[in-house]
Image: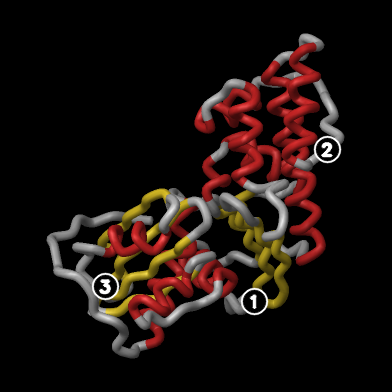
Amino acid sequence: MRCAGIDIGSRSIEVVVMEDGRTIETRRSDSGFDPLKEALKLLDGAKHDRIMATGYGRHLLEVALDAPTVTEIKAYAAGAKALFPEVRMILDIGGQDSKAIGLNQDGKVLKFEMNDRCAAGTGKFLEIMARTLGFTLDEFGPEALKGKKDIQISSMCTVFAESEITSLVSKGEDRRDIALALHRSVVRRASSMVKRVSRQKPIVFAGGVARNPCMRHLIGEALQMEILVPRNPQMVGAFGAALLCEERGETGQRCFSPQPVSVFQI
């Protein structure tokens, strides 16, 4: 029995297909202007018997395919616990929201805090700031690590921060120093959220922003602990949904035609 977990986020969509506890296929695409269309396209050809959806747009599949859904909090808890059995805390920074999730030793959610009302401190904020400074998103983290000067960014509002960056550049400040300051601003916000939820460790850093080396370094520095990062941190939610789909043990929506799959590891 093959179970698919799909995480429909505001910026990207991830799919993980599992069979007997083993990941056999992963897929990913941008959410685009029509997340449902992109989600169906990703699922098309992925051979599965049951499906569970999570993420910002999970209810789209609930309506379209009568698929069961699970909250992002539970999906991330299940995924992180399976990848790192010792985990007690999860920080997820995605495209347009961020979450801090505290777990007990059995992986049950004890407390969580979520920022989904403001782009500040999210991947979207970093993406806009990178573009403002003339960096690609892939360049932004590595270049920020080269910064040396301590510059203070006073605003986390995207509009005001853009204006502040333009002013700093016009004054001759090094773009890498400004990039480092922006990363530190995001980390201050994220680490404060983590500390309000729990100070237990170890902590798993998930979501697309966890791919940023400067963010990983600064989060570890701010929390004064080792940060555990999955090989594909953006897949944790879909992985957790696939695991929960297997546990559910109920026949879900069958859809699309089977095609051969390859072996992947999350």
* 99 relative to 64, above or below: above
Determine contact: label 3, label 2, CB under 8 Å. Answer: no
List x then y, in percent, for residue 251.
Answer: 29, 88
Number of other residues with Cα within 10 Å of mark 1, as a class: few under 14, some 14 to 19, many 20 or more: some
List x then y, in percent, for residue 188.
Answer: 79, 45
Determine contact: label 2, label 1, CB under 8 Å. Answer: no
Label 3 sits on what residue type? Glu
Q: Residue at x 71, y 59 (%)?
A: 117
Number of other residues with Cα within 10 Å of mark 3, as a class: few under 14, some 14 to 19, many 20 or more: some
**Residue at numbered disc 3:** 19
List x then y, in percent, for residue 79.
Answer: 48, 67
Which of marks 2 and 3 precedes in the sequence? 3
Horizontally, is 215 left or right of 39 in the view? right
Determine contact: label 1, label 3, CB under 8 Å. Answer: no
Q: What element carries label 3?
A: strand
* 51 relative to 237, above or below: below
List x then y, in percent, for residue 50.
Answer: 30, 79
* 113 relative to 108, above or below: above
Q: Residue at x 38, y 72 (%)?
A: 242
Horizontally, is 189 left or right of 98 in the view? right
**Residue at numbered disc 1:** 109
Which of marks 3 and 1 precedes in the sequence? 3
Label 1 sits on what residue type? Val
Residue 6 found in image quarter: bottom left
* Quadrant of the drawing holding the N terminus: bottom left
Please state which of the two labelled residues, at mark 2 or mark 1, is closer to the viewer: 2
**Residue at numbered disc 2:** 155
Closer-to-camera residue (190/218): 190
Label 2 sits on what residue type? Ser
Alpha carbon separation for disc pair 1 and 3: 25 Å
Which of marks 1 and 2 precedes in the sequence? 1
